[in-house]
Image (tube, rainbow, N blue to C red):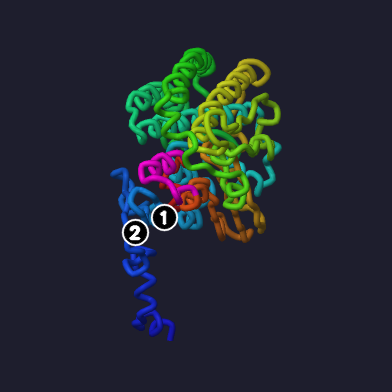
Amino acid sequence: MANQIQYQYKEDNLLKSEPNKYQEKDLKSEEMLVNLGPQHPSTHGVLRLEIVTDGEIIRDVVPHLGYLHRCFEKHAESLPYNQTIPYVDRMDYLTAMNSEHAWAMGVEKMLGITDKIPKRVEYIRVLVAELNRMASHFVAVGTYAMDIGAFTPFLWMMRDREHIQRLLEWASGARMLYNYIWVGGLFYDLPVGFEDRCQQFVDYLRPKLDELKRLVIDNKIFVERTANIGVLPLDLAINYGVTGPMLRGSGLRYDLRKVDGYSVYPEIDFDVPVGEGLVGTKGDCWDRTYVRVLEIHESLKIIEQCIQKLKGEHKRTRDFDPQALVPKKIRPKAQEIYTRAENPKGELGFYFRADGKSDVPFRCKARSCCYVNLSIISELSKGSMIADLIAILGSIDIVLGEVDR
């Protein structure tokens, strides 16, 4: 009977498969239906914006999401917990270390070994995660400047990001998909001399950030293209579940590194920057970019404190084994948990359901920040100019591997 219903023709079913929400008959005589996207060769079929316009003015935006053939959640439900980490890397390939950290913390919480992880391992995790946070923000700011017409900042950002890529490659052996943070430990300890070279990078980057601020954030053209554009009121951001720099750009000092205090973040001194509407309205595109630049400064502070700990109180020893607590077999007892972490783009959370009989999760659900943050684009865009829609979409900072899971 179910099969008969599946193949039965109904006109309503055909309408549900229409590629657009709006039809010609829904439009007023002065309105027009325009499709925007894909805007990148790798986003074929993953994101298209259906726009209803009245001349240059946007009346509505409907995001249409496709598939990137990742199917992360189904992969996670067919593999042992530790073998899923390479797939976690591919969700947001710009923040692989941060995502690995969130996954490992979730499984360790299920196993009840969170408090047993050595402090050296925890400081190394935070160190590489903050390096990855800076690399992600470099891409966000550089490509955002390019979205609205400036090419030079992108080259500057890629130049400095390359230093981070080389550091992470030195530690893990891979440039982007690291598989470095394991459940219970790390793939390997830091290479000898890593801390000193990392400190050299911090000393190199700090004056470069002042140049970045003058080149992008204080640039008159950049301000005119982003200030008072795509204003996100705080109450709307909260109602939509928006997190990360988008939420903080609207003025709420909410950061899971402070709120949840996971790993060794409670032992580290750093600030949580928020948007203040310095050149426009609080919560506009400029505020979101400004918060990302300030967060790079804060990551430098965190990295310096991790280096001090790794060279002092928790320095390397001959008998230290970062894989000492890595379990050979992971079979948590029957339970349901939700764990989360502050990724560069917002809250990344994992819901696990274990049945206590298997090495693979009975159910795994990912709460990805890119997917949730993108859901507000319709609210941000109504009444804007078409050219401003590019600025609004870029300010959300999405990676579509996380939108399609």
**What kind of element bears circle 1?**
strand
Instruction: Name the residue: 51% across, 13% down.
Output: 203
Residue assigned mark 2: 31
Residue assigned mark 1: 59
Q: Amino acid at mark 2?
A: Glu
Cα distance in 3D space between marks 2 and 1: 8 Å
Residue 381 shown in magenta: yes
Left or right placement of residue 129 versus residue 108 in this view: left
For marks 2 and 1 on the same chain, the one whose residue lies earlier in the sequence: 2
Residue 157 visible in rendering:
yes
Q: Amino acid at mark 1?
A: Arg
Which stretch did the figure color magenta?
A: 380-395
Left or right placement of residue 65 versus residue 104 in this view: left
Q: Nearer the viewer, residue 59 or 245?
A: 59
Percent of width and height locating residue 296: 53, 26
Q: Are marks 2 and 1 in contact (CB under 8 Å)?
A: yes
Q: Quadrant of the N terminus?
A: bottom left
Asked which quadrant contains residue 232, the reply is top right
Residue 358 shown in magenta: no
Percent of width and height locating residue 152: 34, 23
Residue 128 visible in rendering:
no
**What kind of element bears circle 2?**
loop
Q: Nearer the viewer, residue 390 or 327?
A: 390
Instruction: In the rendered view, tell whether residue 152 sits above or below residue 344.
Output: above
Instruction: Give the label on residue 81, or none.
Output: none
